[in-house]
Image (spheres, grey):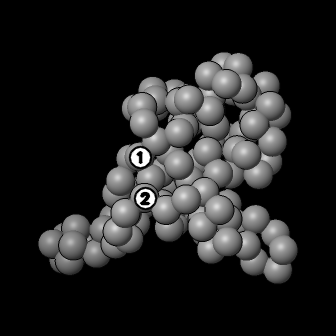
Amino acid sequence: MLSGRPQAGTLVGIALADGQLSISKIGKLAARTRDSAFICTALDTVARAKGMSRVAKATGPGRESLHKSLDGTTKPEFDTIQKVVNSFDVKLLAQPTKKSARSAS
């Protein structure tokens, strides 16, 4: 698990693969932390890289409102998160953790 809240630039640096922003890498990295503020920061990072105005247009709220929702200091509605993720042309997936997979056997 990562410690502390990394800066947006750190996330982009980690997620750059061959000059392309890897939304998948950012998502996996963020999900591993199980930290909702970190996950929102990761979504904000991707939204900024893709263009906050474009993401806001696809999701409904204005650019400033969307940024405030994703800055890691608030707890946005799940509907907002879902719309943001959908605007990235990716989907949320639930997978069992190693612990729950072991207990199922």
Q: Position of residue 91 (x, y in %)?
A: 61, 50
CB atoms at circles 2 and 1 under 8 Å apart?
yes
**Does residue 7 appear to the left or right of 86 in the view shown?**
left
Q: Position of residue 25 (x, y in %)?
A: 61, 69
Q: Residues within 10 Å of mark 2 (few under 14, many from 20)?
A: some
Q: Name the disc covering residue 5, or none.
A: 2
* Residue 12, picture quadrant: bottom right
- The one nearer the camera, 85 or 93, is 85
- Vertically, is 36 above or below 75? below
Q: Name the disc covering residue 37, or none.
A: 1
User: If the image is split into quadrants, where does the C terminus sit?
Assistant: bottom left
Q: What residue type is disc 2 on?
A: Arg
- Vertically, is 66 above or below 90? above
- The one nearer the camera, 75 or 99, is 75
Residue occupying the point 62% across, 22% down: 65
- The residue tagged with tag 1: helix, strand or loop? helix
Q: Position of residue 62 (x, y in %)?
A: 71, 20
Question: Can residue 88 be seen?
Answer: no
Residue occupying the point 47% across, 51% down: 39
